[in-house]
Amino acid sequence: MNIRNDQYTIILLLLFFPSLGISQVEFFGYMETEYDWMEVKESTYAFGYNKLRLDYESFPAEEVSIRGNINFQTYHGQTIWEAFDFLPFDSLNINGEAVHSMPISFLDSIYMDNLYINAAFPRFDVTLGRQPISLGTGYAWNPLDIFNQKELVDPTYEQPGVHAVRLEYYINEKCIVDFILSPDTNFTQPSGMIQVKSNVASFDYSVNVARKNHLYPFWEDEDTVSTHRETSFIGGSFTGEISEYGMWGEALWSLSSNNSAGDVSYGLDHTFNNGLYVMLEGYHNSLGAEKDGLYDFHYLNYFSGETKSLMQNYLFSLLSKQINEYVSCSVFIFGNLDDNSFMYAPQLSWEILQDVSLSAFTAFSSGDADSEFGIQNQSFRVRMRAYF
Amino acid sequence: MDEHYQKVTIYLPVLLTLILGTALYSQNMSASAILDSMTAAMQPVSAKGKMEQEIISSKNVKRVFTFEYFSENNGENVLIRYLEPRKVKNNAFLIKNNGEDIWVYFPRTRRVRKLASHAKNQKAQGSDFSYEDFSGSENWKNDYKVNLGDSGERETYLLNFIRKEKADVSYNKQNIFVDKRTYYPHRIFYFEDDEHVKTLEFKEITEIQHYPTAQRMVMKNHAEGSQTEMRILNMEYNVEFEENFFSERNLKK
């Protein structure tokens, strides 16, 4: 059993559990079990996990809340994966040495995903600790969210907590100024964002400025050795509708004149009178590889979370329909417009009982065998979640 | 006798014209006056309470949701926060400007999303109520023309609502049967493309702070054979909310 961030967890437990003890604590959460099978490159993987998420919340004073959750996760099936099965090449040159194997292990774990305290003052709220942060208006991509990265096959799944100090200042009913500061491990290069949110007519919008230790493309500065630099960004978002068509967009772009990099997402949705929901979202990331310009480091940057996409241009679409009171079906189609590889993923969701849901998902790909999605032949997933 | 007959023949048509004219005029007046009285009776300026929502599917499967309900300005702004079941605990909706703007809050991600109005006619948490059904009573005045019909019942008026051109609402017609004594509705028929799709019945009407209040409201979905019952667990009217209560800040609490 592996305990992640053990020192941090113990410190937080020592700090916060006494305060939980003096007031009534409410526990709730869910148990989730998942079975997966996938065929990728020339290998097949059968695996799964059981996860228990125990949420708790406590209100030690009228305007103070403490919330968090502990997760217990066990894996089964194939728990050691080979990274090269997901890459279009079979070896990598690292520091002059050819590497032919990069195993990834999934270990049973207990971890505290969130633990934070929130205090409400007359004009502002302060949230301290490891907390959920979710920024932006996009569904599959959020350029403004410098703290998280989404999975395209599961974009609405909860994101890991972020260590941060957050202050939300309410200027009036319509205007919020949001300050977020997330320290890194050494407290020397924190990531931060200031967001001003408001609305005009039927549109919500935000203006954002951010600073973070960001990937700095070495191909734009041949003298530099490091691939990271403190970079300032400016961005914004909007969401609203015109003639019953919902629309949204967001962008974040660097302010550096010699390192012009950033990403943009934009989308459109509509619900027809028969209940059919249709959504389309596009994404452009200047840090991704250009068409016919894909190299090893692009994969490394993407899989390590340094960039939000492997290449530059993507499309995500979703069709969904409620079949009856408890069953809904949806089809996700997303793809890389630069290498013309796509995934087609129908999903069926069934609310079995009031607090129990079951979903089945399968995915097929198209594209060349060495393309981003073409390499993943097909997959199947069953997930059951029971809330308590 | 002749003189008397002459007077009657002269005055009777005048009198009838006056009476009928007044009656016709007062009938038109009555429709809007009844609507005003009804909205005043059924929607106090502000309210705060706890409600239970039971959804019964066409296959008789029951699900129960409990939520807190807050409203102000005669339902112009509404905040709903779910308490049960666990799956939707702390999910919340902020409905402003009589349903024109809807925001939804997901506590697991602490994310607030604005819903486009095309989602207004979709089911709220799988119930037979749509988001639009939670809109305030101003919609009846702004989006519909109203006239008085014959309810065929001694104790009720019938208000017929016909959607105005360009009004952004999903029902093209609504019929409301209004109690002549209390001006509280007995039932509402909802029509889409002239088809009677849903019926809302108001049951166990009691007074809370002098306002008639249905302790149970049953929405029957005729197209799907399902129904949703709302039950009031507690309710308080004319509540003074703090400034900016109906805002994103409170949605996330």
Image (spheres, coloured by chain):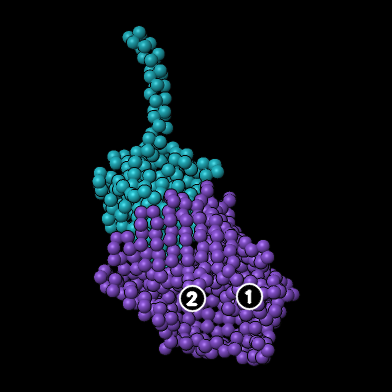
Chain colours: A purple, B cyan
Figure check: A148 above or below B41 = below
Crowding around mark 2 (Cα neighbors within 10 Å: few <14, some 14 to 19, many 20+) is: few
- Frontmost residue, B111 versus A207: A207
Q: Secondary structure at mark 1?
A: loop
Q: Secondary structure at mark 2?
A: loop
- Frontmost residue, A292 versus A224: A224
Residue B211 shown left or right of residue A103 in the figure:
left
Q: Residue at x 41, y 18 (%)?
A: B13
For the C terminus of chain A, the image quarter is bottom left
Q: Which residue is mark 2?
A: A186
Q: Chain of mark 1?
A: A
For the N terminus of chain A, the image quarter is bottom left
Q: Chain of mark 2?
A: A
Where is residue A298 drawn, in percent x and y?
66, 77
Q: Is mark 2 in CB contact (under 8 Å) with mark 1?
A: no
Say whether residue A189 is visible. yes
Where is residue A156 drawn, in percent x and y?
51, 69
Where is residue B9 drawn, in percent x and y?
39, 14
Q: Residue at x 38, y 15 (%)?
A: B11
Q: Which residue is mark 1?
A: A227
Q: Quadrant of residue B50?
A: bottom left
